[in-house]
Image (cartoon, helix red, strand yellow):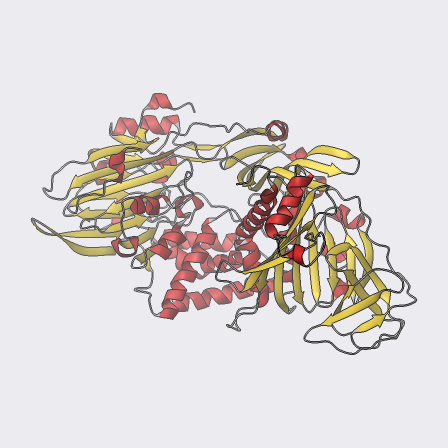
């Protein structure tokens, strides 16, 4: 099953100086094309917040959070490279956690199929004793990481607000960056994860989303 | 694939296996009593796994015990892909590499490129992982021996094997790289090192290959010459000339020859054939394709056939093109590219086995996958 | 300003904003010229930045009169759906074409070697075409408010240039590695 829309964001929690994240800073390090810089829509660049959009890129930074995102699948690895470059250039920035998050909007074949996803994830029998016409609005489930890294995998499922009879699935691949060995910096841990575990993260998120969306298949199983 | 391929060698049977897709080469040697030596590594394009390791797994061999030595003859992509997996799984194997690869210049390159691992595996990435593995073992006290540094006439392996007829000695020598070659290689690494302000990009493999490790295997008088990628050079203290003139460990003539550098003319030294090889040896090689380089060429094939009728190649370097099922992809590929072809033109495995006693037992040649005897009419280039 | 993040219940002039702080809740007064960042939870399009109004009871702050600094992000995004995506690296560069190895990331097919027209590369990226340069090539559909297009997007990888510090650190680590592996 193919998603109708999807997006990717890479998020860090740490200590940032939003004022530096002007598009021209990215251009000065040759991280994005000069034409993209010229066409960038800057919403704010201030010591407390930096928000701008380039053609395929959205940057959103506050003091304790950095987020880079795109809704263009062709730019996923470009986004990854950009984020690697940013944290490499700012290698002294304290980072605590990293999230590699994919979001998908799947369109299901019918209203019935759409309802069946909610029924499968949140069986209504008990809820109907408590509420009149209960419906799943939002579901978040968290699981342990399947690898040796610290963190978790969190999945959110909601009815899609963008696609008719659609299911929105967001997979948060969350990594704790602090290591017990003080000689290993959080920046280098993040760079290694983004370089070496990228492919498995992308495949895992897609697989989870596809399996959830396929719960709505009229021929279940 | 023939079911006999999965039959392991007898305890008293030696084996030389060479694996090769269109890009890459790996060798597995059985030296008797279930003990193996692995030379280089390539990925089996069908499984994506290291070919020699995959083979041993299929033979149901416990590689953590059975593999005694892993040799990296040089650092080029086509000889090391998957090698870190070999080092990881073959926990009791010693590791041998060209002396040039322990130079500060090469290790600096590794450290630089370890920061930015690219999705597409490269030779340097494999060495980054290998050194991390060895370092971790050293920290844990489980590293058996430091890596052996291959140089002229160095003993990399020297152990007896017990046969029903008595003990025989198995020896593996490195015959290169010479001091001169090592210096050249180190200079090359230094020149490859990026400078401040230079863009980060994937490092490309150089040619010619001076730091390549040529190996001489002796099992009770039967010898095999594994030519790696060593090329001819005008420097009498490098390439094949220095081996022919200065080596003191070579005795007798080899009955099996792994043809260097995929049969290229630049690696052909006539004196090797006349002085180091028996008459009409078994010659084995793998093809190589990269850009507009296709090896061996038609001329190379003719030359090899003239030297021995018993020449075998793991796959024929023919061009194969993938038919994209998606129409949009198909149309854009046609518009955006002048040409597009599969990297791997095929995959094959040549296996040579012989009894270790009696001494003069001849080799049994088996060909699997696309492996074939070398014939000139098969080549279009 | 403290490291507080805010979740707006609703983006209206008199919206109530609940603050979460790490490690715990704090009492703060925000003066009228302080900027409060208020993302609408789970919806980056509704990001707005407002000025505080000086009121705070610790957990809640009434924004009251506010000066919106930015409008909400407009909709009308473009979505690219890849049917095929490769990561490639350049082997040789010619006059009008360059040869590259391609590994499939999305889609089908074995590793490819391809001769690609230089004119398919955006002008801004052409200086990056060198042996060893890495790029991504995607083929798929680009969905825009105005309709759907077939698209082929080829983009070269950009990383910061090598710094003196990086080169020195690598050399220092090389010495360490030689020591660890008993090399004189």
Give B310 or B57, whichever is nearer the viewer.
B57
Residue B245 position, x and y percent, is 26, 46
Residue A10 position, x and y percent, is 65, 56
Does the rendering let one see residue B210?
A: yes
Tell me which corner region of the image, top left, top right, bottom left or bottom right, holds residue B20: top left
Residue B13 position, x and y percent, is 17, 43
Does the rendering let one see residue B154?
A: no
Q: Is residue C138 above or below residue A90?
A: above
Question: Which residue is situated farthest in the left direction here?
Answer: B165
Q: Tell me: B303 left or right of A10.
A: left
Give A192 or B147, whichever is nearer the viewer.
A192
State the residue at coordinates (48%, 57%). B110
Q: Tell me: B86 left or right of C124.
A: left
Tell me which corner region of the image, top left, top right, bottom left or bottom right, holds residue B8: top left
Question: Which residue is situated farthest in the top direction here?
Answer: B377
Residue B79 position, x and y percent, is 39, 45
Q: Is residue C126 above or below residue A134?
A: above
Q: How many marks?
A: 0
State the residue at coordinates (58%, 50%). A205
Q: Is residue B324 above or below residue B144?
A: above
Question: Which residue is situated farthest in the front direction here?
Answer: A129
- Quadrant in which the N terminus of chain A appears: top right
């Amino acid at each position: 099953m193919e998603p109708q829309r999807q997006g990717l964001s890479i998020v860090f929690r740490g200590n940032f100086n939003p004022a530096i994240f002007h598009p021209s800073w990215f251009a000065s390090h040759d991280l994005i094309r000069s034409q993209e810089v010229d066409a960038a829509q800057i919403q704010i660049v201030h010591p407390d917040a930096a928000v701008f959009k380039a053609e395929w890129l959205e940057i959103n930074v506050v003091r304790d959070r950095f987020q880079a995102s795109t809704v263009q699948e062709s730019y996923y690895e470009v986004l990854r490279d950009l984020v690697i470059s940013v944290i490499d250039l700012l290698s002294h920035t304290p980072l605590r956690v990293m999230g590699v998050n994919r979001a998908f909007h799947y369109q299901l074949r019918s209203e019935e199929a759409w309802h069946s996803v909610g029924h499968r994830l949140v069986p209504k029998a008990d809820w109907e004793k408590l509420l009149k016409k209960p419906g799943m609005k939002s579901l978040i489930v968290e699981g342990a990481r399947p690898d040796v890294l610290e963190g978790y995998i969190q999945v959110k499922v909601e009815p899609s607000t963008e696609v008719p009879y659609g299911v929105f699935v967001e997979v948060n691949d969350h990594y704790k960056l602090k290591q017990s060995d003080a000689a290993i910096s959080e920046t280098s841990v993040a760079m290694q994860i983004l370089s070496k575990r990228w492919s498995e993260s992308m495949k895992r998120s897609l697989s989870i989303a596809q399996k959830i969306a396929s719960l709505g298949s009229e021929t279940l199983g | 694939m023939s079911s006999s391929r999965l039959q392991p060698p007898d305890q008293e049977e030696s084996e030389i296996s060479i694996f090769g897709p269109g890009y890459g080469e790996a060798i597995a040697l059985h030296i008797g009593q279930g003990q193996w030596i692995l030379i280089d590594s390539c990925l089996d394009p069908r499984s994506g796994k290291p070919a020699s390791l995959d083979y041993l797994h299929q033979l149901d061999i416990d590689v953590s015990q059975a593999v005694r030595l892993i040799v990296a003859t040089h650092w080029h992509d086509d000889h090391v892909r998957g090698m870190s997996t070999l080092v990881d799984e073959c926990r009791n194997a010693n590791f041998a590499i060209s002396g040039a690869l322990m130079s500060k210049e090469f290790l600096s390159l590794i450290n630089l490129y370890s920061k930015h691992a690219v999705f597409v595996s490269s030779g340097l990435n494999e060495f980054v992982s290998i050194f991390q593995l060895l370092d971790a073992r050293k920290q844990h006290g489980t590293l058996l021996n430091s890596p052996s540094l291959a140089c002229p006439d160095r003993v990399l392996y020297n152990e007896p094997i017990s046969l029903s007829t008595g003990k025989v000695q198995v020896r593996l020598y490195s015959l290169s790289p010479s001091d001169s070659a090592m210096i050249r290689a180190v200079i090359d690494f230094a020149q490859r090192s990026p400078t401040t302000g230079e863009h980060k990009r994937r490092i490309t493999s150089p040619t010619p290959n001076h730091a390549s490790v040529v190996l001489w295997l002796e099992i009770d008088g039967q010898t095999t010459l594994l030519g790696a990628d060593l090329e001819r050079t005008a420097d009498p203290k490098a390439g094949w000339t220095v081996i022919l003139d200065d080596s003191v460990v070579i005795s007798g003539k080899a009955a099996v020859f792994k043809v260097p550098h995929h049969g290229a003319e630049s690696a052909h030294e006539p004196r090797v054939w006349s002085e180091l090889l028996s008459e009409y040896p078994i010659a084995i090689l793998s093809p190589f394709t990269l850009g507009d380089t296709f090896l061996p060429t038609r001329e190379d094939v003719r030359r090899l056939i003239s030297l021995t009728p018993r020449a075998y190649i793991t796959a024929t370097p023919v061009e194969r093109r993938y038919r994209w099922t998606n129409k949009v992809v198909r149309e854009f590929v046609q518009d955006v590219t002048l040409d597009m072809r599969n990297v791997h033109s095929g995959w094959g495995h040549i296996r040579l086995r012989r009894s270790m006693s009696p001494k003069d037992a001849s080799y049994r040649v088996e060909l699997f996958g696309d492996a074939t005897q070398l014939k000139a009419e098969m080549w279009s280039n | 300003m403290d490291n507080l993040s805010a979740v707006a219940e609703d983006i209206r002039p008199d919206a109530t904003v609940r603050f979460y702080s790490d490690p715990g809740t704090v009492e703060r007064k925000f003066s009228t010229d302080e900027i409060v960042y208020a993302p609408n939870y789970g919806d980056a399009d509704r990001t707005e930045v407002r000025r505080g109004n000086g009121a705070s009871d610790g957990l809640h702050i009434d924004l009251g009169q506010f000066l919106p600094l930015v409008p909400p992000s407009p909709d009308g995004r473009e979505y690219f759906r890849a049917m095929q995506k490769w990561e490639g690296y350049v082997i040789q560069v010619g006059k009008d074409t360059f040869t590259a190895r391609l590994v499939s990331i999305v889609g089908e097919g074995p590793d490819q070697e391809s001769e690609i027209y230089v004119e398919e590369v955006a002008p801004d990226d052409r200086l990056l075409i060198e042996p060893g340069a890495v790029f991504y090539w995607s083929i798929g559909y680009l969905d825009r408010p105005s309709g759907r297009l077939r698209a082929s997007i080829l983009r070269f990888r950009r990383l910061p240039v090598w710094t003196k510090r990086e080169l020195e650190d690598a050399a220092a680590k090389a010495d360490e590695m030689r020591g660890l592996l008993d090399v004189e």
